[in-house]
Amino acid sequence: MTEAISVSKLNTYIKQIFDAEELLHNIPVVGEVFGVSLSRNVIYFSLKDENATLSCVCFYPNYISLIEEGSKVIVTGSPNYYVKGGKLNFNVIKVEKVGQGKLYEEFLKLKEKLQNEGLFDIAHKKPLPKVINRIGVITSKEGAVIQDIKNIAWRRNPSVDIVLYNTKVQGNLAENEIAHAIDVMGKYDKIDVIIVARGGGSLEDLWAYNTEIVARSAYNCPKPLISAVGHETDFTIIDFVSDLRAPTPSAAAELLTYDLADRKAEMWGIFDYFNKTATNYIQDKFTESKILSLKLTNNIEKLLSQEETDLLHKKENLIKSLDNFINQKYYEIGLVETTIQKIDPTNILKSGFAKVEQDNGSVNLLQDLNMDKDITLTFYDGIVKAQPIKENKK
């Protein structure tokens, strides 16, 4: 029995065979470019013809402008067997552009036609609904795409429904199945949004999504439609017609679902924000009320103090007015007393006058005196009776 050798030993042996074969050094290879990517100034791509593909690596980033998806090129280089990964790559040292591949030319021709007809216009794009409860997915039930969409969507939001319309994703008449699925799902009222999806591949693999029948069905679809065909670097006609392009099917599932954990955290954040806002608002209003209360108290105290001062002034003015009034009245009373004293009969009698009375009445004039009757003379210190005497006139 032959002794087993290690994987490393076998891979090293294979690499030595390639390195030793001079006929494989610096040979030109012609083919159509697909699957281009650039990482750390290293260009990764593949060449294909009708029957085979070749993985290529180019360490000269200045060739990136020539290595375009769908272009036909002649690359010069050598096959290199990577021992650690057990993979054969063609190391490219020179690139010459021959022309574009037939499929890519057809792609550009259809793209220009549909663009001129307005199928790519932004004005025709439909916005995604704010609430998405059911997602329609058009893809193959056998591929990993539908599983990726379900896993991501249900991990983020288990309540969302996913409705699958099983179709071919490449090959003969695949475009007819895809277009028919779009037409059917577009009429289904309970579908909120539609994803047209498949995994990555070459331009030929993705060709069903570059057909006019699929493009027009996507354009006429009444439901919002997301294109999720291929990898991020792959572009198809349906990408330009659809309402939104997702770089991958997984990205489409993320775009159309919200993460419950994130939503809960967001809601708690909103709750905390409103709680803090309400607390701060109440605290601010409480502080404002205290300030207003202090201001009101101070104003009341100032008002009361002012009123008290005004009352004191009014009291003083009233007392002064009363004093003046009383003094005035005392003065007037003094005048009256003086007048009364002046006309007081007692004072008059003290001055040497006497009051003459006759028949119980006062006699002020001589002509009123009855000479035949007695009179009464009232002096200050007593009363006397007298007989009037007629004066003899000579």
Image (cartoon, rainbow, N blue to C red):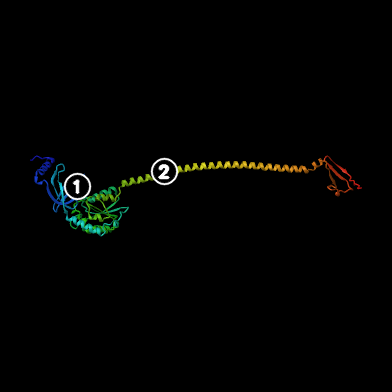
- Mark nearest the camera among 1 and 2 is 1
Q: Are marks 1 and 2 in contact (CB under 8 Å)?
A: no
Mark identifier at residue 52: none
Which of the pair 382/320 is nearer the observer? 320
Query: Residue 211, position in %: x, y?
Result: 21, 57
Circle 1 SS class: helix
Q: Quadrant of the N terminus?
A: top left
Q: What residue did someone put label 1 on? A: 62
Which of the pair 282/17 is nearer the observer? 17
For residue 324, what is the image quadrant?
A: top right
* Residue 94 seen anywhere in this rendered image of the structure: yes
In the rendered view, tell whether residue 275 sits above or below residue 129. above
In the rendered view, tell whether residue 359 sits above or below residue 219. above
Q: Residue at x 77, y 43 (%)?
A: 342
Q: Residue at x 19, y 47 (%)?
A: 62
How many marks overall? 2
- Give whichever of discs 1 and 2 has the lower sequence position: 1
Circle 2 SS class: helix
In the rendered view, tell whether residue 16 sits above or below residue 99. above
In the rendered view, tell whether residue 222 sits above or below residue 383. below
Label 1 crowd (10 A; few <14 / some 14-19 / many >=20):
few
Label 2 crowd (10 A; few <14 / some 14-19 / many >=20):
few
Query: Residue 102, position in %: x, y?
Result: 17, 56
For residue 308, what is the image quadrant?
A: top right
* Structural distance between the alpha carbons of marks 1 and 2: 60 Å
Three-letter amino acid code at the position of disc 2: Asn
Which of the pair 53/371 is nearer the observer? 371
Image side of residue 316 versus residue 217, left or right: right
Query: Residue 244, position in %: x, y?
Result: 27, 53
Q: What residue did someone put label 2 on? A: 280
Three-letter amino acid code at the position of disc 1: Asn
